[in-house]
Amino acid sequence: MQPTSTASVAKAAPSMTVTKTTAASVPSGKSQKVDNSVDKKKRRKARKETWASYLYKVLKQVHPDTGISNKGMAIMNSFIIDIFERIATEAARLCLYSKKSTIASREIQTAVRLILPGELSKHAISEGTKTVTSKHLGAAVSFVSVV
């Protein structure tokens, strides 16, 4: 293995320009930092989708004078995500068993029956059916309130 010369290292990175200034060239006597003129775009933060606004609307429908903390909202948000994920997974499994490629309302209803216990599944199914059959746009909020 041969040692690399400084000339070959300088050729490796021709795109970066480095500007150095000495203390003598700066009038105030302070030295400046090395300036790398590589333009970087600022990245936007990825937006997180949450159910917070919908949960807050349901809370105000049920208890208008009650609030919720950020930590409580985070717990409720993760609960809703977990329940929906369980329902979607079970509905997908039911489609696999019946050799269908589309998750229909029937698979969702069956998944809800399997996942939610007793009376809760009956209420969820009735609210879901009411939401699907009605033309009301805000009806989806009532479905979230049951689950």
Image: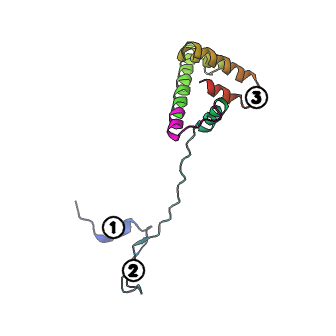
Residue at the image point whose x is 33% and y is 68% from the top: 8
Image quadrant in which the C terminus is located: top right
* Residue 72 is a magenta residue: yes
- Earlier residue among tags 3 and 2: 2
- Whether 57 is drawn above or below 96: the answer is below
- Whether 67 is drawn above or below 30: the answer is above
The residue under label 2 is 21
State which mark lies toward you, 3 or 2. Answer: 3
The residue under label 1 is 9
Secondary element at image label 1:
helix
Outermost residue, left side: 1
Which residue is at the front of the view, 105 or 84?
84
Spatial CA span between label 3 and label 1: 68 Å
Outermost residue, front side: 65
Q: Are marks 3 and 2 in contact (CB under 8 Å)?
A: no
Q: Residues within 10 Å of mark 3 (few under 14, many from 20)?
A: few
Give the amino acid type for the residue marked by disc 2 in the picture. Thr
Is residue 122 something that shows in the picture?
yes
Magenta region: 63-76
The residue under label 3 is 136
Colouring mode (rainbow / by chain / secondary structure / one colour) = rainbow
The percent position of residue 72, horizontal first and vertical second, equals 51, 36
Secondary element at image label 2:
loop
The percent position of residue 9, horizontal first and vertical second, equals 33, 67
* Residue 16 is a magenta residue: no
Secondary element at image label 3:
loop
